[in-house]
Image (cartoon, rainbow, N blue to C red):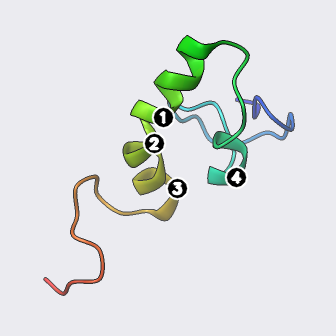
Amino acid sequence: MTCDACGRTTAWNPWGACSIHHYNRPRPTAEEQQDMINSAPEALAYYLGIQPGSPAGEDG
């Protein structure tokens, strides 16, 4: 797939961006912006390579 922000070829992911930096960009409509905000925790987990809902900074 190509990144929606920069056009770089990247592995497929449900957010259409090659990095969290490009994921976290302004969206053209308020609805799309709200969708981005709502999916931010899962997207951040994906880009950091951790499981969604994992406690941050804790061993275990």
Q: Residue at x 47, y 23 (%)?
A: 35
Disc 2 target residue: 40
Which amino acid, by three-letter code, is at mark 2?
Ala
On screen, residue 22 versus residue 45, left or right, reads right
Instruction: Check whether the beta carbons of the residues at disc 2 and disc 4 lie within 8 A of each other.
Output: no
Vertical placement of residue 31 versus 55, above or below: above
Q: Quadrant of residue 58?
A: bottom left
Mark 2 and mark 4: span between their CA atoms? 12 Å
> Considering the numbered disc 3 on the image, is that residue within a helix, a strand or a loop?
helix
The residue under label 4 is which amino acid type?
His
- Asked which quadrant contains residue 16, the reply is top right
User: What residue sits 75% from the left and 34% below the top?
Assistant: 3
**Which quadrant: the N terminus?**
top right
Kindly report the distance in space between the C-alpha atoms of the residues bearing marks 2 and 3. Answer: 10 Å
* In-front residue for pair 5/36: 36
Task: Give the residue pinned by disc 3.
Answer: 47
Give the residue type at disc 3.
Tyr
Give the residue at mark 1: 37
For label 2, the SS is: helix
Q: Do the residues bearing badges 2 and 1 touch, measured as CB atoms within 8 Å?
A: yes
